[in-house]
Amino acid sequence: MAVLRLILGDQLSRSLSCLRDADKEKDVILLAEVREEATYVRHHKQKIVFLFSAMRHFADDLSKDGYEVRYIRYDDDGNTHSLGGEVKRALDEREDLEGLIVTECGEYRLAEEMASWSRRFGRSVEIREDDRFFCSLKEFDEWAGDGKTLRMEYFYRDMRRRTGLLMEGDAPAGGEWNYDQENRKRLPKEYKAPERKTIRHDETTKDVIDLVDAAFADHFGSLEDFRYGVTRNQARRQLDDFIETSLPNFGDYQDAMGTGEDFLNHSLLSAYINAGLLLPREVCEAAEEAYRDGQAPLNAVEGFIRQILGWREFIRGVYWREMPGYKDDNALDAKRSLPAFYWTGETDMHCLAEAIRNTRDHAYAHHIQRLMVTGNFALLAGVVPAEIEEWYLIVYADAYEWVELPNVRGMAIFADGGVFASKPYAASGSYINRMSDYCKSCTYSVSKKIGEGACPFNYLYWDFLIRHEDRLRSNQRMSLVYGNLDKKSADDRQAITEQATEFLDSLET
């Protein structure tokens, strides 16, 4: 029996479940660059280049290996520009294809569409589990049970036990599960981040850059410095380079930020993992091997593995467990529109200007820039959840809704009311000053809490606490900050509210 096997742009793994029993003599493998997927949000130009080029290289490798590949380019004649349309076209043109086999997708909107394909096309459709993850969705649901509140730390410990990663028998390596307290150091003066290996791009990638530059000219982002690898071998070399040069100091400085320091010691591997060019297990095992061989300290390796084995798997489980209603949560009743500077980077707040510049130039910013700068501002300002969530989905090369939505709605802006975060991650300018050098180059004064020239994060922080006092004061983890708020006079509170309102209203004009 001959079948059509569809591979999505974030499924570029040779071990993919829908490929395992593919018959080179009979089956057809379909990959398609379609407008519907490239523009359901206006993805960063570099994300589109990365995925289109990676898809083309992956298809070429399959063809060289003897598979029959049907590859639809963006500008091909007859391209229907939807995945469903291309599946139907392939099935209509090949009567010998008795059905479709595909690996489950990562986004709810596409899963709903796929569920209709068998009826729509009149052929059998087999949707297989995506077993590239450590934890299946069924296993996550069993772990979560009926609990209304989920905590990643407990899930992470369970995953360590299941996989044996960083374990010494039944105990965690080093005697502790989590070394996060050791991973919050500020960059030393004159710190020099590791040099990153450059990637030479072939004609395929250059052609895609030209295509995207023409067809997606109005999308966010710059194409001047495209650094992503687009093949399995290139991604693997990036992993090896990270382990050798950046992992040893990753732990110490993973929360640090610095002006002009776009990457520091971060791995830059999330786009490869989320697209399938690297598998999460091989990445975690490479990091563990560095620890076992004495090449990287435990705090660095544990912190890195926790991001993948713990956080990435946990977030995926939350997404599928809470959807589709999760997209409608707005626990803090946020109503303000996303400020225009999220697209332009034109703001006197240096921390935001730096994070957005980095995002524009590289389709990348590290987790603290995302959570405690761009996310923190959206939280304090009360930005409509759907608007800030769409921004994150658009601007990062590693962003897919399954990973973006819970991270933003649950972690950054607390719009889900605490499904898995125990409190809002709200912070004043003091946090940004402690973890970066941004404030030294800022128009505003981080030491000034209110009045002319005061850091907006300072009075927005207190205004946030005042606005949401009825909801948040009872949270035990907020008791200290509300105790500090109680020390402020009625006049101080009024002045804070007035300056915050005036500042936020000015952003709309």
Image (cartoon, rainbow, N blue to C red):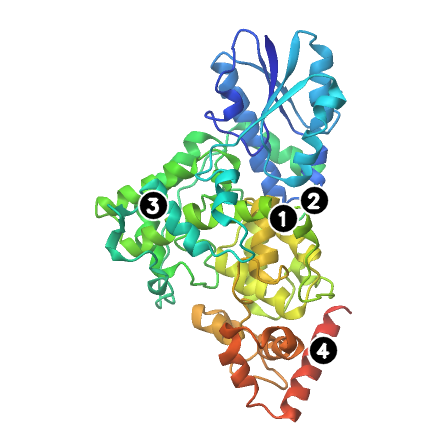
Q: Tell me the mark number nearer the camera, choosing from 1 and 3.
A: 3
Whether residue 455 sits left or right of residue 199 in the image: it is right
Residue under label 4? 501
In the rendered image, which quarter is residue 6 located in?
A: top right
Residue under the point 64% across and 67% down? 347
Q: Can you say whether 167 is above or below 457 in the image?
A: above
| Distance CA(mark 1)–CA(mark 4) | 28 Å
Tell me residue 85's x, y (percent): 74, 24
Tell me residue 465's x, y (percent): 61, 77
Count residues near mark 4 (Cα–Cα under 10 Å), then give few for <14, some for 14-19, many for 20+: some
Q: Is residue 95 visible?
A: yes
Amino acid type, callout 2: Val
Tell me residue 430's x, y (percent): 49, 76
Q: Is the Cβ of the residue at disc 1 closer than 8 Å to that at disc 2?
A: yes
| Secondary structure type for disc 1 | helix
* First in sequence: mark 4 vs mark 3: 3
| Secondary structure type for disc 2 | loop
Amino acid type, callout 4: Thr
Residue under the point 68% across and 78% down? 500
Count residues near mark 3 (Cα–Cα under 10 Å), then give few for <14, some for 14-19, many for 20+: some
| Secondary structure type for disc 4 | helix
Amino acid type, callout 1: Leu
Q: Can you say whether 19 is above or below 110 in the image?
A: above
Residue under the point 71% across and 32% down? 113
Residue under label 2? 41
Residue under label 1? 393
Residue under label 3? 161
| Distance CA(mark 4)–CA(mark 2) | 30 Å
* First in sequence: mark 4 vs mark 2: 2
